[in-house]
Amino acid sequence: MTKKIKTYWVDEFGVKNYNTFYLLLVTLVVLYAIIALLSVPLVYFEASADQANIKSYRDAFWVLQMSASTIGFGDYYPVTFEGRLIIAFMFYVGVGMVGFIGAQFVNKFVGFSDTNVKNRELRKQNAQILKNNERLEKKVELLMAQMSQLLNAEQKIVASEQDIIESERAIIKTEKDIIDKAK
């Protein structure tokens, strides 16, 4: 029974997290496939040149591998224009792919540049903040309702006090009228 490599998993926030081993494996396979394929035209263009030092598929494979890794020992080098184009192309492809491999290696062992982890932490914090905001919104709504009830009660009290004041004025006027009639 063969074990299938899991290419990625989806976390609770829907973020795809790719398997580092899988990415490294695919990158290496693609890199060496490109080197193997480009070795054929490189030998074709270089082998027929007068001062060529790349005379076999093995030499072409070696020089492409060295240019992909940006080492370039100089023991083999292209002398034709077409050969130089192939090497230049391999250099740019190799810089990207070898750089990617190096970044994956460093990230796997050092881990400080893993933005997926930071994004998940931020999403968890955002979820907590949103939950707290909802809780606070409910509290504010309750306070607003209580303040509205208090305001209504206060308005009723003020209206009652005004009625009492009017009643007292009426009583005072009546008392004055009685005193004035008594004089």
Image (tube, rainbow, N blue to C red):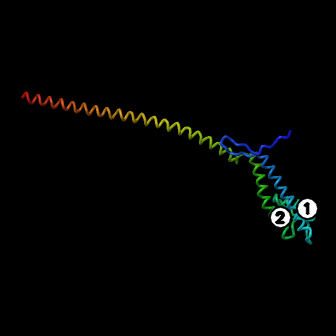
Where's residue 132, x and y in %? 55, 38
Quarter of the image for residue 82 reads: bottom right
Q: Closest to the observer: 106 or 58? A: 58
Where's residue 23, x and y in %? 78, 49
Point 74% across, 48% down: residue: 107
Left or right of 50, for residue 137: left
Quarter of the image for residue 123 reads: top right
SS under mark 1 = helix
Kindly identify the amino acid type of the residue bearing the numbered disc 2: Ile
Left or right of 27, for residue 119: left
Q: Give the quarter of the figure containing the N terminus.
A: top right
Residue position for label 1:
59
Quarter of the image for residue 143 reads: top left
Residue at the outermost bottom position: 50
Residue 181 marker: none
Point 27% across, 32% down: residue: 161
Point 15% across, 30% down: residue: 174
Category of crowding for the residue at label 1, using alpha-carbon neighbours closer than 10 angstroms: few (below 14), some (14–19), many (at least 20): some
Residue position for label 2:
87
Category of crowding for the residue at label 2, using alpha-carbon neighbours closer than 10 angstroms: few (below 14), some (14–19), many (at least 20): many
Where's residue 177, x and y in %? 12, 30
Q: Closest to the observer: 45 or 118? A: 45
Q: Earlier in the sequence, mark 1 or mark 2?
A: 1
